[in-house]
Image (cartoon, rainbow, N blue to C red):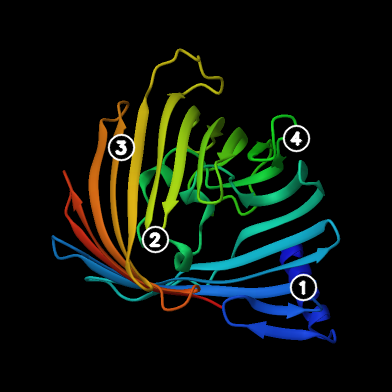
Amino acid sequence: MRKILLFFILLIGFTYASDVTYRFGRGLSVDNRFYLGGYTSFQYEHRENGYYEYKIDDIAVLGFYRQGKLKIFGELEAKNWYVKRKGSESEFNLKLHTERFYLEYAFNESFKTRIGRFITPLGIWNQVHINALKWTTSDPVTAEWFYPRFSTGLDIYGFLPVIDDTTEYHFFIQKTKNIDDAYNNVRTNDFIGFQFKKFFGINRYFGINGGRYYDTQFKETSIFLGIFGYLNIKRFYLMGEGYIAHENEEHHADYSGRIDKESYYIQTVYRVFSKNYLVVRNEYFKDRSDKGYLNVWTFGWNYKPLFNISIKGEYQFFEKRDNRFLASFAVLF
């Protein structure tokens, strides 16, 4: 709570500065040091079995202050602010959650540090949490079922100076309870991971990552490894991620090499004409421990009248579940 109050005190103080400008989608700028913005989205879902729901998925405010090499970043979000489901009363969830809150210091391009609660710096999809910037309303399972989406700890990152300046690295560690612990897909107090991402020009890269974490809710340790890649050639975009994981109910995994979970997604995006994109994605998931299985094809359309506005619709075909239709409207202020 004290950190949240500090965030708003900073907001009030900088609002009285002399140079204040606002640009739609890029937020409020105060003296080119303090920035304040926000985003929201509306989402509709209808399943083949007749179930439906519509909701204001999130209302968020975010801001950061930059002074030289130092950056302070904060983001607050009300998730599922309004929800109406078939056969139930409307629900309002007005609780604010701490999405992100961290301090960052850049010594140089090769060595930067971040401490606090931040988005876990792994893969492609997990790095984008704002609906307006996503290709589809739905998220592939690799972004949900293999590691905590948020970390509270220390992240050391930059570009490797020894090899060249086109390989980005991340090493992060968490040894404490999460800030806003319940607001995460996995509850953990012990998480360590790494990532290397090699750029081949502006529009293509390939990477590997991995880590280990302890799930405090289910009392098990998970070790995971992943690969990912991205390619953009004119109108065509191709991206994908793949993960394997080993789980053990003891705090210290046995490192037996057994694969308990595996998953991938491959997604193609094609700009059909200006501001309109066709999206096709296949994703696969298998969990040998509880016989979980998922194979789904997603066909979607994304209309972006502006870079900060997205109107999306998609239909998902599931192999062993009810198919569903999703639509959303999202805007970044």
> Could you tell me which residue is drawn at 40 percent across and 35 percent down?
242
**Marks 3 and 2, Cα distance to the nearest angstrom?**
20 Å
Left or right of residue 189, residue 218 in this image: left
Query: For numbered disc 2, what is the local secondary structure?
Result: loop
Which mark is in front, 4 or 3? 4
Q: In the rendering, at what x and y percent does residue 189 appear?
A: 62, 38
User: Residue 73: x and y, percent?
Assistant: 71, 61
> Of label 2 and label 1, which has the lower sequence position?
1
Q: Mark 1 Cα within 10 Å, few/some/many (few <14, many 20+)?
A: many
Pointer 4: what residue?
A: 161
Of label 4 and label 1, which has the lower sequence position? 1
Q: Nearer the viewer, mark 2 or mark 4?
A: 4
Q: Residue 285: give its label.
A: 3
Q: Is residue 144 visible?
A: no
Of badges 3 and 2, the one in the foreground is: 2
Residue marked by disc 2: 135
Cα–Cα gap, marks 4 and 3: 37 Å
SS of the residue under disc 4: loop
Q: Is residue 124 left or right of residue 46?
A: right
Question: Dividing the image into 4 quarters, which one contains the N terminus?
Answer: bottom right
* Three-letter code, disc 4: Pro
Mark nearer the N terminus (4 vs 3): 4
The mark that comes first in sequence, 3 or 1, is: 1
Q: Residues within 10 Å of mark 4 (few under 14, many from 20)?
A: few
